[in-house]
Amino acid sequence: MARLDSFANELLCHIFSFLQPFDLVSPMRVNKLFHGLIEPMIWTKLELHGPGYHEYYQYPEELVDSESLQKRNYLATGTDYNPDPNEREYSDLTGRFLRVFNESEEGVSPVRRMALAEHVRFLCADLTYDDEDDTDPWGIIAGFSNLEHLELTVPWAWGDTFDTALEAFASKEHRPLAKLRTIRLRGYVPKEFVQFVCQGAAGITDLELAALDRPIGSNNHAGKRVNPPPGTKTKVDSDDEDSASDGESEDDDAEDFDEEAIAPRGLPALLDKIDLIGQFSSLTRLSLARPTQSAEDADYRDEYVSVKSDLAILQEWAALIRATRGMLEHLILEQRPFAEEIEQDSTGDREFLVFYPYGPGYDRFVEHTLPALLEEGAEWPRLKSVRLYGFDVPAEYYSDDSDQTPEPQRLLAILEARFKPRGVEVRSGLGRRMIYEDDDGTIRSGGDGFGGIRFELEDD
């Protein structure tokens, strides 16, 4: 009987391809031949979450690469994705991965670290990090010079971890990731990192931005905010103009965040880089998501909403749409109405989305972003589909015995009139709402990194 290591390398690679990465560890230790063949198979394409993550959180019609999902290298131990972060067997997977590339980590030589970094071409991670990891997560990812696909879900990093990691990243020079083609960022991703990965804009074909700005906690908990934004303006007694703390802005345009609860804010990461936005010349898929203020007559309305942040996001959306509409094939726009955690006691997810979608956030979109979609003479030569989530209430979500009169699907009707005659498929979905905790201002942990859970499984 022929020895396995006598087979041609191509045949060995084919045999090994049927195994999951965690099953390849043992044969990789057999000899140098196996090690050399298997190591790239483990490190080239990395899924740092459990199998089923994408199927669980993405809308079904957005699973455009569903076949390839079955072939991805999930480094978890084979368990299905668990939406509860406290129950995941693989919760520390990303932390362990980052520590391999940490310069202070013992047992990994710089040469070995560089060799592994060069293997990484596809990275999809639930990027949870903390100060105990003592890592530079953004700098580590920036060092994957051959990276082609980057997909990150980023919860808020507690304490000083967010700022410490950002300072570590900003303190070093990083070469652009020239091979990047797919960028999908969700959650608390620093603006500086978003701008860095978009430097190769001319080659990017798939861009998804669902980034959140620094959360702002309530000033009614523990006597002070635990995470105020730098340089913000707070209320100052007219009799004591010097009482403002150091670092507060005296700019008249600064926002006053001295409120009981501050709603989540989207992050306009590219708005001050209009020249960079203009360099997207190969983009075929653009997906944009933002938190939004729902109907004013909701009885929970006691949070402060940063209209300034929302307008900046909408202006960024308009700029991206105008810059890329000549090449886009698929456009996905999503807004997630936000609500304090206590709101779950009085309304369910579906009920909330059916009753309160048409609020000030919707109106701001119509005023500031919709014109970019409707401009006379603008050509969309390659557009195939437009997807809307959280804007309109699809008719099927109204029950016959409801006292509520269904609203017309305003935005859907407008965009159908604009694009259907051109053969473009336009669809509208109910979407998801964003739940946040008013004591610290963060979106609920778990979920898809943008505050959304998959309630449809329970309701349907």
Image (cartoon, grey):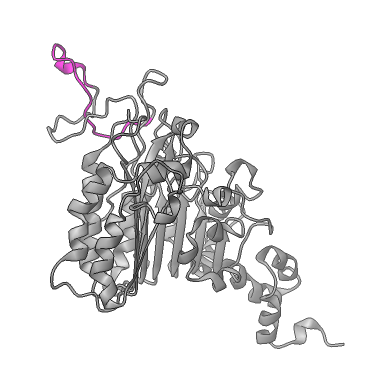
Of all residues, the one furthest to the front in this rendering is: 401
Looking at the image, how many numbered discs can be counted on the residues? 0
Q: Position of residue 225 (x, y in %)?
A: 36, 25
Furthest residue to the right?
1
Q: Relative to 189, does residue 175 appear above or below in the rendering? A: below
| Pick the front one: 224 or 427 | 427
Q: Please give the name of the residue rendered at 60% of the width and 69% of the height, measured from the top-left corner.
A: 70
Region of the chain picked out in magenta, as a range = 227-244
The picture quadrant where one finds residue 338 is: top left
Q: Is residue 82 left or right of residue 381?
A: right
Q: Percent from the top left, x then y, of residue 443?
A: 43, 40
Q: Is residue 253 left or right of residue 56?
A: left
Query: Is any part of residue 166 visible from this angle?
Result: yes
**Where 138 falls versus 285 (above or below)?**
above
Q: Quadrant of residue 333?
A: bottom left
The verdict on residue 240 being magenta is yes
Q: From the viewer's perspective, tell me whether residue 294 is left or right of residue 142.
A: left
Is residue 276 visible in the rendered image? The answer is no
Overall secondary structure of the magenta stretch? loop
Q: Position of residue 183 (x, y in %)?
A: 39, 63
* Of the pair 58 and 69, the residue shown nearer to us: 58
Q: Residue 61: horizontal and vertical position, in percent?
A: 46, 66
| Residue 247 vertical position relative to residue 409 in the rendered view, above or below | above
Magenta-colored stretch includes residue 235: yes
- Identify which residue, 224 or 412, lies in the foreground: 412
Which of 10/269 is in front? 269
For the N terminus, give its image quadrant: bottom right
